[in-house]
Amino acid sequence: MRIAIPYYMDKIFQHFGHAPQFKVYEVENHQVLMEMVVEVEQQGHEAVAALLRSMDVRVVICGNIGQGAMQALQQAGILFYAGVTGDADEAITALIQGGLKYDPNIKCAEHSCSGDCSDCASDCGGDCAACGH
């Protein structure tokens, strides 16, 4: 099974539809057999969901995710675990071991940004509630 994580500098990127990369893992029998980093050429919920589906991704581990992205993943037949932060490799290990902590009720509020938000790699002006700050 292929599992993808929105990715930036070893961490789970907190804005699903604007992730610069995804780290994709091939997992079988509770072991990671392969991993690769894929650059995202087109941003947006539908484009990202289509990219993941084209790579046969079945599960996504992510941080904040909005309703549009949720719907795009559901329409692509991709299960997702949202509200996860921290190191991407640690998250995949936690999922495999059955101990992934996630928030099934996560919602990403729409927000306007005007400054720098290095943790989510967005321009958020320091008001980054919607991207994990």
Image (tube, rainbow, N blue to C red):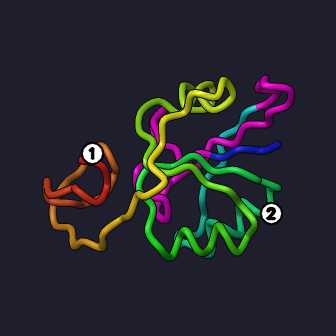
95 over 102 or under it: above or below:
above
Q: Is residue 94 left or right of residue 120?
A: right
Q: Which mark is residue 54?
A: 2
The residue under the point 73% across, 37% down is 25
Mark sitting earlier along the chain (1/2): 2
**Residue 79 location (% of width, % of height):** 68, 56
User: Tag 1's secondary structure?
Assistant: loop
| Three-letter amino acid code at the position of disc 2 | Ser
Q: Is residue 107 magenta?
A: no
Tally of numbered tags: 2
Q: Which of the 4 quarters of the picture holds residue 128? A: bottom left
Q: As rendered, which of 20 and 91 lies closer to the eye?
A: 91
The residue stretch that appears in magenta: 5-34
Q: Is residue 30 magenta?
A: yes
User: Tag 2's secondary structure?
Assistant: helix
| Three-letter amino acid code at the position of disc 1 | Ser
Report how far apart the C-alphas of labels 1 and 2 lie in the structure: 30 Å
Q: Residues within 10 Å of mark 1 (few under 14, many from 20)?
A: few
The residue under the point 60% across, 64% down is 41
Residue that badge 1 annotates: 118
44 over 88 or under it: above or below:
below
Q: Which mark is residue 52?
A: none
Dominant secondary structure of the residues highlighted in magenta in the image: strand
